[in-house]
Amino acid sequence: MIRKFFPAILAILPVLLFAEPAERPVKVVLFPVREAEIVSRIDGTVRHCALKMGDAFKKGDLIMQIDDSRHRIELDRAQAKESDVRYQAKFAWETYLSYKKLFEENIQSHNELARRKAEADSLKAREKIAAADVQDARLILGYCTFKAPFDGRLEQMLCREHETVRAGQPVFKLIDDSSLLAVMNIPQELSISTGSTVKLAFRDGVVTVTGKVYEISPRADHRSGTVEVKALVSNRERKLYSGMVGTLVKEERPQ
């Protein structure tokens, strides 16, 4: 049987060996232009999750709230202590000035004046410490409220209401997909430069978009003979999703 078809195999073998390989399409993968995994900076119980997966938000919008009851008490305590120390420092300074005047009139001793001065300086330092404690308490209280650092959408909520989270624990992920980075590895022989426009196709060519070349790697891959290129693609209408795979559309040049 093999002998029967052997002449035909020999006839097509040169065609198979020396035929030009089919040109492979350049694959494109979309990534969000910005993304962030937010972690909790304090221990606490989740009181409220304002968004669910996929919800859009604006910069400054509330994302999540940790119960802040205890931290509000700590802030009130720190503010009360600061007020008390400020009053004592003011009284100590006024007392020192009074003793200084008496000392100048030779009514008080130098040792007593020095003691009053030391008390005033000590209370002034304690006043600064108390003010710092208030700032620290206010900062920790602020850690209970999670607001969006940029416009975008919630990719994933990593905790639920009434759960206890720990400092350093990731609580949610955010992405900004109003613009997307199209990452591709193009052959070295293709002429492309930063700022040039590329055409991309997704969903088997149903959706085509243009992007502007944002970055070009200065190092080529010697194994594949390609260079990594990133293009910025507008996604205001939300037609595309991060993670989508498409192809680079090569423009036909007139002969």
Image (cartoon, rainbow, N blue to C red):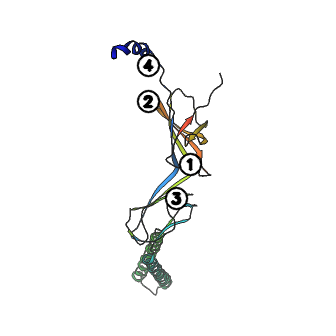
Horizontal relation, residue 21 to residue 239: left or right: left
Query: What residue would you read off at disc 3?
Result: 54
Examine the image and state in which quarter residue 111 appears.
bottom left
3 vs 4, front mark: 4
Examine the image and state in which quarter residue 215 appears.
top right
Q: Is there CB contact under 8 Å for labels 2 and 4? A: no
Q: Amino acid at mark 2?
A: Ser
Q: Give the distance between the C-alpha atoms of the residues marked 2 and 4, in whole angstroms.
A: 23 Å
Tell me if mark 1 has few (under 14), some (14-19) or many (20+) residues whose alpha carbon lies within 10 angstroms of its own: many
| Front residue of 85 and 231 | 231
Q: Position of residue 168 (x, y in %)?
A: 38, 62
Task: Please tell me which of labels 1 and 4 falls first in the chain.
Answer: 4
2 vs 1, front mark: 1
* Residue 16 visible to the viewer: yes
Q: Give the distance between the C-alpha atoms of the residues marked 3 and 4, in whole angstroms.
A: 50 Å
Q: Amino acid at mark 3?
A: Gly
Q: Position of residue 29 (x, y in %)?
A: 50, 42
Q: Which mark is residue 224?
A: 2
| Front residue of 201 and 166 | 201
Q: Which mark is residue 240?
A: 1
2 vs 3, front mark: 3
| Front residue of 2 and 129 | 2
Q: Give the distance between the C-alpha atoms of the residues marked 1 and 4, in whole angstroms.
A: 40 Å
